[in-house]
Image (tube, coloured by chain):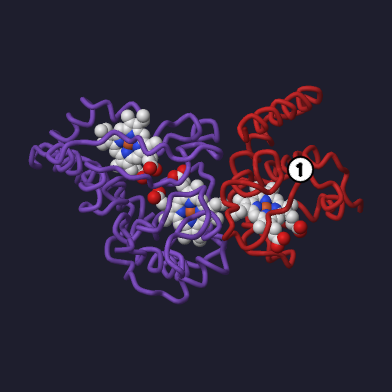
Amino acid sequence: MKKITTIAALAGLSFNLLGAPVMASEPQAVYEFYCAQCHGLTGKGDGPNVTKDFPVSPRNFVDAAEMNKLSNADIKNVVLDGGPSAGKSPMMPPWGKTLTEEEVDGLVEYLRVLCACEGKQG
Amino acid sequence: MRLKLATAMGVACLALSAPVSHAAPADGQAIFEGKDCVSCHYTDGPAREKTIEDQLAKTGPELWYAGDKFQEEWLVGWLADPQPIRPMKFGSLTEENPADHPALSGDESATVTEFLMSLVSGEVEAGTVKVKKNAKGRQIFTKKMPCSGCHEYAGRKGGVTGGRSGPSLAEAGVRLNPDWILAYLQKPTLFKPVKMMPVFVGLLSDKDMANVASYVGNFKPKK
């Protein structure tokens, strides 16, 4: 059941992305490989690491109201330097030594696809 | 520079000693090939994966540095009676580990272990990590860094706690070589150039990496 919803959601996503083919699948692959383990394949914050013991909920990327509180620069910084750099939990890892700047820029765009929101401006 | 030299020498030594060493690794290799273990595991280094797609195309973990990574006694036992190491199915975020790894007989398992333990990178320094209840290591593993967010380990109230995307570390103290744990943290691209685990070089000092390796290397299975 869960699988079906995932597949449906993913199919929906790829469909969206097909409409805007600008280097689309790359950031999605990066997201699914590194981020989905906590944030979930569809971005709802429900990856396999989030068991009842997990100390804080990973940000739900589908929640436009929450995601609108962050600017693109905020997202980029927290992805590069990890939760504590933004006063958040160390359970959000620092990815600056793992991902290239281009990959992180791609992720910022992809999160905006997931939330279907523009984010805080400026 | 020194490392390169050491590797070159290591490789040279291996090449030299291979023909005169006892027959067992070759016997083990024959079983490994005969049982089709090669269809899911490659045993010659260096690492082949360059992209996420390469990593996801694999059907089993690479074994070319198995002799650095595993404790021999654990390996003999596991090959004869394999139990899940990764909570999730290899390469999947949605399916549980099906616990269906092929098993070998006791004799085969000892022979294949000799072969696998002969596979080394030449890049792991022996005797650098002393395992103990390392308080600094614990602090890093459970609080300062997100290690526990992706790896299972023994919970305070019994059972296991922690994340499920990485291999379980609950039995790391009998399964893994603590010197390899340190090398794995220090040389992330050598063993696993593309992985879901973040690179910690530049974020943890060598000393802190040794502390966390010492802490993880002390995880023992519950009796």
Tell me the kind of residue under disc 1.
Answer: Leu
Quarter residue A51 falls in: bottom right
The front one of A94 and A100 is A94
Residue nearest the viewer, comparing A12 with A99? A12
Instruction: Give the labeled residue for mark 1.
Output: A111
Q: Which chain is purple?
A: B
Identify the residue shown where x is 53% and y is 54%. Answer: B163
Mark 1 neighbour class, 10 Å CA radius: few under 14, some 14 to 19, many 20 or more: many
Q: Look at the picture and state if B153 lies above or below A28.
A: below
Task: Give the chain letter for red.
Answer: A
Residue farthest to the bottom? B135
Q: How many marks?
A: 1
Q: Is residue A85 visible?
A: yes
Determine whether, in the image, residue B64 is placed left or right of residue B193: left
Residue A76 left/right relative to B142: right
Quick one: quadrant of the N terminus of chain B? bottom left
Q: Nearer the viewer, residue B52 or B175?
A: B175
Visible residue check, residue A79: no
Task: Report the chain holding disc 1.
Answer: A
Q: Which residue is at the front of the view, B95 or B57?
A: B95
Secondary element under disc 1, as helix, strand or loop, is helix
Q: Position of residue B220 (x, y in %)?
A: 33, 64
**In the figure, is residue B166 to the left or right of A72?**
left
